[in-house]
């Protein structure tokens, strides 16, 4: 049985689905760059999108029952949020390059070029949709972090030892450095 759109609520898994949707949109966006710009911007943009999606997925798989799991999940969500902001900046750069020659980024199914006006409209629509998805993802991650903080308010953060904090920091750094090596 279907639920009307206006009656739907946000799913607890929405931020994971949204992350993978952003990743596919970024891939679609950067493939429209010229070959020269693709070599420069495609790798870092796609890595940021993948890291953001992977960090959200890993964080979602951890249901914290103790202080260590709570810290790891919080660190992964913070990493996801930080990469989301870096991705937003990176995609603004990609948009700036594409808007200089929008008709070069699009062609019709029969191979004929798209008019400059139509190409600019398509590009603006794609950028607007990606920007809205990034803003929505930011709000969803903030909601998950707030809900976790509320749920685990009984965990006294002062009781978390320095060793646990160092362990979590080294885990996140190793994930981050492994992606960008």
Image (cartoon, helix red, strand yellow):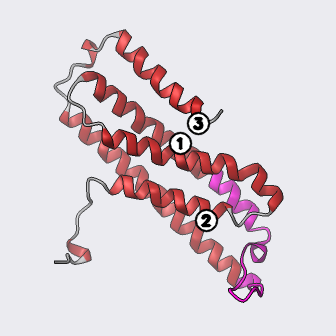
Q: Quadrant of residue 144?
A: top left
- Precedes in sequence: disc 3 or disc 1: 1
Left or right, 44 with reference to 24: right
Packing grade of label 2 (10 A; few <14, some 14-19, many >=20) is few
Give the residue drawn at x 61%, y 65%: 28
Residue for badge 1: 83
Disc 3 to disc 1, how far (Cα)?
A: 12 Å
> Which residue of the protein is positioned furthest toward the top in this rendering?
162
- Classify 136 as above or below 3: above
Secondary structure, mark 1, is: helix
- Classify 78 as above or below 136: above
Residue for badge 2: 28
Check whether the beta carbons of the residues at disc 3 and disc 1 lie within 8 A of each other.
no
Disc 3 to disc 2, how far (Cα)?
A: 21 Å
- Precedes in sequence: disc 2 or disc 1: 2
Which one is closest to the eye, mark 3 or mark 1? 3
Which one is closest to the eye, mark 2 or mark 1? 2
Whether residue 90 is in magenta: the answer is: yes
Left or right, 157 with reference to 113: left
Packing grade of label 3 (10 A; few <14, some 14-19, many >=20) is few
Give the residue drawn at x 16%, y 78%: 1
Residue 62 at what x, y percent from top left?
Answer: 30, 36
Q: Which residues are magenta?
A: 89-117
- Precedes in sequence: disc 3 or disc 2: 2
- Mark number, residue 179: 3
């Amino acid at each position: 049985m279907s639920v009307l759109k206006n009656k739907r609520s946000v799913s607890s898994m929405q931020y994971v689905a949204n992350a993978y949707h952003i990743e596919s949109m970024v891939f679609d966006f950067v493939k429209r760059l010229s070959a020269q710009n693709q070599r420069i911007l495609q790798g870092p943009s796609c890595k940021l999108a993948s890291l953001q999606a992977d960090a959200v997925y890993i964080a979602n798989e951890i249901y914290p029952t103790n202080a260590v799991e709570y810290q790891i999940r919080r660190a992964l969500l913070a990493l996801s949020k930080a990469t989301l902001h870096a991705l937003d900046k990176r995609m603004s750069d990609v948009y700036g390059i594409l808007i200089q020659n929008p008709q070069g980024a699009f062609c019709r199914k029969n191979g004929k070029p798209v008019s400059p006006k139509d190409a600019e409209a398509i590009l603006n629509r794609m950028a607007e949709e990606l920007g809205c998805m990034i803003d929505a993802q930011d709000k969803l991650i903030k909601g998950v972090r707030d809900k976790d903080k509320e749920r685990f308010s009984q965990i006294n953060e002062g009781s978390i030892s320095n060793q646990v904090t160092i362990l979590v920091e080294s885990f996140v750094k190793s994930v981050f450095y492994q992606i960008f090596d």
